[in-house]
């Protein structure tokens, strides 16, 4: 049975936000171990500074994964048909990230009702870090 919030979904609906962080150096080290992304620019301050950065910064896929939670927690992972995002700016240590989604289109394809969702991840200072879209099956 389709949940009522999906059946009633329409253009302009805003999905529940997900907050993540604040980003810590420890979090970046743990993510490096879990993901296999051991690029030192994310976990070694000396390496980051030698590369011209003021500090280490989050692995892109860490933020990507959190952003993916917006449509999947709202509709269910089994209803996710497509997901993509582009990196707009770096997620810095101490950033608190808020991930948002808004339905921008509802359409029918192959007998199902689907929604296109615009997604953004924003730091506490208003800086957009990710922009993307998802397609979810509503019915």
Image (tube, rainbow, N blue to C red):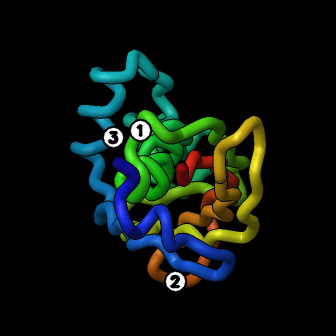
Residue 17 is situated, as x and y percent measured from the top left of the image, at: 40, 72
Residue 112 is situated, as x and y percent measured from the top left of the image, at: 65, 44
Q: Residue drawn at (35%, 58%), measured in percent from left and top?
A: 3
Question: Is any part of residue 72 visible from this angle?
Answer: yes
Residue 49 is situated, as x and y percent measured from the top left of the image, at: 54, 46
Q: Is residue 73 left or right of residue 117?
A: left
Question: Is any part of residue 56 visible from this angle?
Answer: no
Callout 2 crowding tier (Cα within 10 Å): few <14, some 14–19, many ≥20: few
Quadrant in which residue 20 is drawn:
bottom left
Q: Residue drawn at (55%, 64%), measured in percent from left and top?
A: 121
Task: For marks 1 and 3, give the one nearer the viewer.
Answer: 1
Camera-nearest residue between 76 and 36? 76
**Label 2 sits on residue:** 125
**Label 1 sits on residue:** 77
- Of callouts 1 and 3, which one flags the residue occurring earlier in the amino acid sequence? 3
Q: Is residue 1 left or right of residue 8?
A: left
**Label 3 sits on residue:** 28
Task: For marks 2 and 1, give the one nearer the viewer.
Answer: 1
- Of callouts 2 and 3, which one flags the residue occurring earlier in the amino acid sequence? 3
Q: Residue drawn at (39%, 72%), measured in percent from left and top?
A: 16
Measured in 3D between alpha carbons, the distance from the residue under mark 2 to the one under mark 1, in whole angstroms, is 30 Å
Identify the secondary structure beneath mark 1: helix
Q: Is residue 88 left or right of residue 60?
A: right
């Amino acid at each position: 049975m389709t949940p009522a919030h999906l059946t009633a979904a329409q253009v302009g609906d805003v999905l529940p936000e997900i907050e993540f962080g604040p980003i810590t150096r420890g979090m970046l080290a743990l993510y490096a171990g879990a993901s296999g992304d051991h690029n030192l620019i994310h976990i070694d301050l000396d390496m980051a500074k030698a590369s011209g950065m003021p500090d280490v910064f989050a692995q892109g896929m860490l933020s990507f994964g959190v952003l993916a939670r917006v449509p999947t927690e709202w509709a269910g992972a089994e209803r996710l048909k497509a997901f993509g995002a582009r990196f707009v700016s770096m997620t810095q240590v101490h950033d608190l990230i808020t991930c948002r989604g808004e339905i921008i289109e509802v359409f029918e394809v192959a007998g199902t009702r689907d929604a296109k969702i615009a997604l953004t991840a924003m730091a506490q200072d208003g800086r957009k870090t990710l922009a993307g879209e998802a397609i979810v099956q509503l019915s």
